[in-house]
Amino acid sequence: MKNILATIVGLIVASLSVYVFESLIGHNLFPLPEGANPMDMEWIKNNMDKIPIGSKVFVVIAHFVGIVIGMFVAAKISKTSMIPSYIVGIFMLLATLFNIIMLPKELWFTLSDGILTIIGFVIGKSLAQKQITTAS
């Protein structure tokens, strides 16, 4: 039961982290153009060139931070299994992959988002493993 809770909380924390960095910080520092609707995938697809570069950088940062924090929190709650962290990490990797496939982006954006998310998974795994205690 604890591992189920760890997985759910890890996913929630990862998602909230992405939201904070992408929307609250990124969109406030680098506002989207007038009339933009960030919840409308069609608008984003058709207007990717109008989104400020700083906002795109915060999307990449958000995906990186989200996966690291989500995996860490899942392990912190579980304390005995890496499975919740792996589930969170894989879910976040798949979400980033979906984002990369669904939205046309510049090459730098696609590469940095994919590479930093993979690096985030590796760092998240390392931090998570330090939270796991083994019975002696």
Image (cartoon, helix red, strand yellow):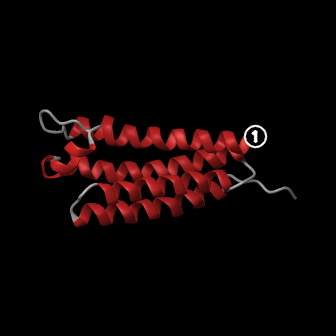
Q: Nearer the viewer, residue 48 or 66?
A: 48
Q: Residue at x 67, y 52 (%)?
A: 131
Residue 106, quarter of the rendered image: bottom left
Q: Quadrant of the N terminus?
A: top right
Q: Nearer the viewer, residue 105 or 40?
A: 40
Task: Count numbered badges in the picture.
Answer: 1
74 w.r.t. 116: above or below? above
113 w.r.t. 61: above or below? below
**How crowded is the residue under tag 1: few (<14 C-alpha within 10 Å), some, or many (20+)?**
few
Q: Nearer the viewer, residue 122 or 7?
A: 7
Q: Residue at x 59, y 61 (%)?
A: 126
Q: Residue at x 39, y 39 (%)?
A: 19
Q: Is residue 107 left or right of residue 130?
A: left
Residue 9, horizontal then vertical, whole percent: 59, 39
| Residue beneath disc 1 | 1
Residue 40, quarter of the rendered image: top left
Q: Amino acid at mark 1?
A: Met
Residue 112, quarter of the rendered image: bottom left
